[in-house]
Image (cartoon, rainbow, N blue to C red):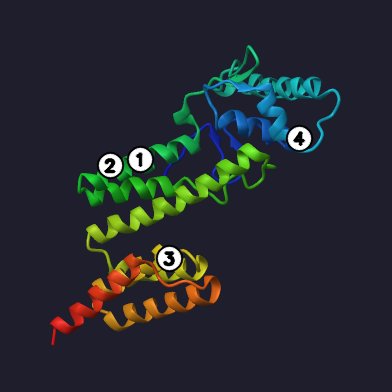
Amino acid sequence: MTDDNALIRLLGSLEVARVENITAAKLRQVLALLAVNANTVVSTEQLIDELWTDEPPRTVRTVLQTYIYQLRKLFAEAAANGIGADLLVTRPGGYVLDLPREDIDVFRFRNLVDRGKEALARDEPGRAGDLLREALDLWRGPVFTDVDLGPSLRGLAAYLDELRLEALTLRIEADFGSNRHREIVGELRYLVAHHELHESFYVLLMRALHGSGRRADALSVFGQLRRVLDDELGIEPSLEARQVQTEILTSACNTH
């Protein structure tokens, strides 16, 4: 596991270093939206739209100002423990969480994934694998697991979930580049079982099995993919999956 010392952690439950547990649901929601937009003005209207998807209360701006005051009070109380008291700044039309983005795990995750992609593009699978593992280790559970989600956070959660799967796929690609086919077969079987319609995991499992000398098992996975897609979606496997199947069949013929 990576030693994550981020001040604000959102990839799982909401945690703020050296700040007592924030129990009020709306307060967690305000902080989450400010954190994922760190160093950017979050308008009052954005906050209202996020917190009240139905009709907001008549005194909504006063209520929102109360939440901001409560967060400032929490930060001020934590100032003696190393967090600045003036993190939450008022700007025309809204508020800014004045905190370096590297102190928030969401931004660390995205940065590490980008660096992992760059390492793969440079044909450095070992380095890429290390970066992507570090990125994935930041996750402690479902993103925003204890935060109520309005439209903005819900959209971001969906994006981060997809990016997590992409990072996982890239890390497996990096493992292939390091000739670790056998080591990742078990992990890929787990991923196929838990992401039944995620075709790329079937393709990766086929490649891992083939790279481990298990051609028959690899072809069996293709048959499983075909059945699942037909039963659930009424479609055929993608061109990529069919090409991998062809490569496996061709390599089997070439050995005879």
Instruction: Give the distance between the C-alpha atoms of the residues marked 1 and 2, in whole angstroms.
Output: 6 Å
Name the residue: 54% across, 20% down.
Answer: 98
Q: Which residue is mark 2?
A: 118
Disc 3: CA contacts within 10 A as few (<14), some (14-19) or many (>=20): some
Asked which secondary structure carries label 3, the reply is helix
* Residue bearing the label numbered 1: 114
> 84 or 107, which lies in front?
107
Up-down relation of residue 220 to residue 164 (above or below): below
Are the residues at dot 1 and dot 2 in contact (C-beta closer than 8 Å)? Answer: yes
Q: Which residue is mark 4?
A: 52
Name the residue that disc number 3 marks: 199
Q: Earlier in the sequence, mark 3 or mark 2?
A: 2
Q: Amino acid type of disc 1?
A: Asp
* Disc 1, SS: helix
Q: Quadrant of the C terminus?
A: bottom left
State the CA–CA distance, disc 4 to disc 3.
Answer: 37 Å
Q: Position of residue 55 (x, y in %)?
A: 82, 34
Q: Residue 183's x, y, as percent?
A: 31, 67
Q: Residue at x 50, y 33 (%)?
A: 104
Q: Is residue 251 left or right of residue 222?
A: left
For badge 2, the amino acid type reads: Glu
Q: Residue at x 43, y 49 (%)?
A: 136
Residue 1 visible within the image? no
